Image (cartoon, rainbow, N blue to C red):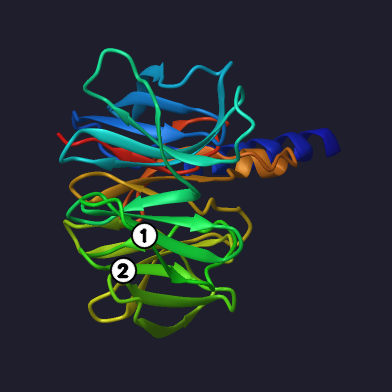
Amino acid sequence: MKFIQYLLATLSITGLILFLEKNCISNDKFEYSLVISNGVELKLANLIDNAIKNTQEILDRLEWTHALYPCFNAKNNELFFEAENLRSPTPVWIYAINLSGKAYEPRKIVEGQAPSINTNYSMLSYYKHPHELWVVSFENGEKRKIADDIGNNTPAVWFSEYELLYRNKENKLVKINGETGAKKDTGIEGIDPSAFSPKIGKVLCSADGRKIYLYSPENNNLELIKEFKFLSVGRSFVFTNNGDSFLYTRQTLFKQLQINEGHDLFICLLNGNETKVLENVALFGGVFLPD
């Protein structure tokens, strides 16, 4: 009898897990090209019908590592990212690659980490240890420090031609003007900004390793999209170009029952419906390329 009760309980839990983890996004045909980082390497890939396909390594793994936070300059088809060159004694630099070329040859841009490009592709922001936020102009190469209180190696997020969001050392969400350095405290704490969509004018943020928010810089409003009571959520998000969905990583119930802290990659609509895209993957930034 006890065995039968155990079997029924196990089947019930399995059925619940299958229900919770099933695909929730419709099977409408769609295809996007993107670049994503898994914390070690950059991969060019296609997202086709809720699946990552046709992956291609951009950098030679024998020469490069810790390639993170890719961002794209649509004006000249260049991809920017931070990386370590294993054959060079120099520290982490930000590099650029022209994706139009036949061979991807990285070139040094500036010593720093966590690059981010503004909405009209005229400036690049980056982090310098300790706690410094810098910007460099693509037009004249001028470099300027605009803040000295950014959280450790935290990417800033541009939400306009001149304005950025970042989490400071006091765990507060701050707006800053990339031209003047003028700051504004939003009054919001415990939020990590990650990705901006020009289509909807909002920023994806995480909190407490359990919650996903949409933040509106225009009215300083936070909207909760998803909340998990027991499953951990990654801090990196990647908006699709139309702004109606995004990629992110989280723990699954299967993994939690196995005491496995690894994450899977999901694509999620803004209404919270989602489907799994890839298993056992880390996400350290990414960008969807222009359609």
Q: What element carries label 1?
A: strand
Q: State the residue position of label 1.
A: 135
Q: Earlier in the sequence, mark 2 or mark 1?
A: 1
Q: Report x, y in % for residue 275.
A: 39, 39
CA distance separating discs 2 and 1? 7 Å
The residue at 68%/43% (across/down) is 261
| In this rendering, position of residue 74 left or right of residue 171 | left
Looking at the image, which is closer to me, 250 or 19? 250
Looking at the image, which is closer to me, 124 or 278? 124
The residue at 32%/35% (across/down) is 79
Q: Which quadrant would residue 247 be assigned to in this image?
A: top left
Q: State the residue position of label 2.
A: 178
| Residue that protrudes farthest toward the top in the picture | 102
Packing grade of label 2 (10 A; few <14, some 14-19, many >=20) is: many
Q: Which numbered disc covers residue 113?
A: none
Q: Report the quarter where the N terminus lies.
A: top right
| In this rendering, position of residue 82 left or right of residue 12 | left
Q: Report the quarter where the C terminus lies.
A: top left
Instruction: Specify whether residue 234 is in view.
Output: yes
Q: Which quadrant would residue 149 be assigned to in this image?
A: bottom right
Q: Report x, y in % for residue 25.
A: 30, 41
Instruction: Specify whether residue 1 is in view.
Output: no
Instruction: Establish if 87 lies above or below 232.
Output: above
The residue at 41%/21% (across/down) is 58
Q: Report x, y in % for residue 113.
A: 50, 49
- The amino acid type, in three-letter code, at marker 2 is Gly
Is mark 2 in CB contact (under 8 Å) with mark 1? yes
- The amino acid type, in three-letter code, at marker 1 is Val
